[in-house]
Amino acid sequence: MKLENKMGNRLFLCIVVASSLAFFSGILSVVEALDNGLARTPPMGWMHWERFRCITNCTEDPENCLSEKLIMETADRMAADGYRDAGYKYISIDDCWMSKQRDSSGRLQSDPIRFPSGIKALADYVHSKGLKLGIYEDFGQYTCMGYPGSEFYLELDANTFAEWGVDMLKLDGCNSNIHDMTAGYETMGFFLNRTNRPILYACSWPAYTDSTANLTDYNVIKKHCNMWRNYRDIQDSWEITLDIINYYGKDDGGFSQLAGPGAWNDPDETGSVGAWMRPLAGNKTYAIALLNSDNQGVPTTVNVKLENFGLTQESSYTFYDAFDGSSFGTFSVNDTIKVRINPTSIFMVTARPANKNYRNYREKY
């Protein structure tokens, strides 16, 4: 999906799980996607990294260390507080969950102090809450934080994750050769599919090969990954978040055009005013968003011509608030609407074909 602002800049908007509840987005494409039947709609959920990082000392910091206790308590909250029922199904463990050594058979094993029950038991618990468990590995010899990587163990690790009942794998790319990634990420996808367990495959492939354009073919990536990480880590910083937004606005390689059922861009959680539109429901209904990237204290007011969105199939459209479903008004394709948006905030509506009766102008605050 693309956002157009008054200066004609394009902005790709996609929000990803990373220690907060968010969503993945994109637009439909005719390019073939990974054929495992997963991620037909954008996967939603929670991932531990952005908030809890690699905190592993449960003696000194029991409330924040990465442990089965943290994951189970988070699963409890997702189920009890309504997030699961709203569609946030995945609860995903990032780096630092495992022991520093594989077992005598070469298999990965969870840290015995922080995950004493093992990942299989944790997956069973998460499943009992109506949720899905995601896990982390790395294509290289070591993970980003120095734990055992999957290089030379791709098939064994895929089988291990399947036996544990894992539902999603994030495969990172630290400590590896970017020239091996095409073959490596494809191979892991092949082994995941051979397990016959539905495991959503999240690749960090293009995040590492982006600087070498001939190694980043998004048509190929889409065939092997359910979602793919494109850029840098999100931080607790609007400056970094805005940098990620701007990166997606450039859309180098045209990756925004390839996102759709079964395959999604993953900018690790995001988010002048930009305007975005995506067709829904057979191209008769549209989702429209206005994003204010300004971080100053005063709301920004913009006038938006509906024809600039490409709403030309019908003579008029009714807008509905995307969050509460209330009607925002009915407009002709020639109308202009005035919208006031708070700093770093978003205005989002759906547009549906309306009858011939419409109002020509409306303000929204």
Image (cartoon, rainbow, N blue to C red):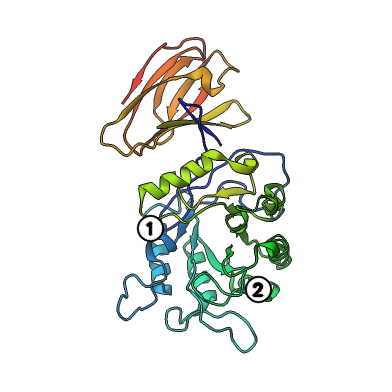
Amino acid type, mark 1 = Ala
Could you tell me residue 146's position as x and y percent?
A: 51, 75
| Disc 1 packing (10 Å; few <14; some 14–19; many ≥20) | few
Which residue shows up at 38% across the image and 47% down it?
239
Could you tell me residue 245's position as x and y percent?
A: 47, 43
Residue nearest the observer in this picture, 97 or 123: 97
Which residue shows up at 51% across the image and 81% down it?
99
Residue 297 in the figure: left or right of residue 155 = left
Residue 81 appears in which quarter of the rendering? Answer: bottom left
State the residue lying farthest toward the bottom.
104
Could you tell me residue 322's position as x and y percent?
A: 44, 34
Q: Which residue is mark 1?
A: 80
In the depicted structure, whether residue 309 falls above or below residue 160: above
Amino acid type, mark 2 = Glu
Query: How many circles with numbers are drawn on the protein?
Result: 2
Residue 248 in the figure: left or right of residue 156 = left
Residue 48 visible, this orientation: no
* Viewport quadrant of the N terminus: top right
Residue 49 visible, this orientation: yes
Q: Which residue is mark 2?
A: 151
For the residue labelled by badge 1, is the local secondary structure a helix, a strand or a loop?
Answer: helix
Residue nearest the observer in this picture, 354 or 287: 287
| Disc 2 packing (10 Å; few <14; some 14–19; many ≥20) | some
Residue nearest the observer in this picture, 318 or 278: 278
Residue 84 appears in which quarter of the rendering? Answer: bottom left
Residue nearest the observer in this picture, 218 or 253: 253
Depth-wise, is mark 2 or mark 1 nearer the camera? 2
* Viewport quadrant of the C terminus: top left
Which residue shows up at 42% across the image and 79% down it?
114
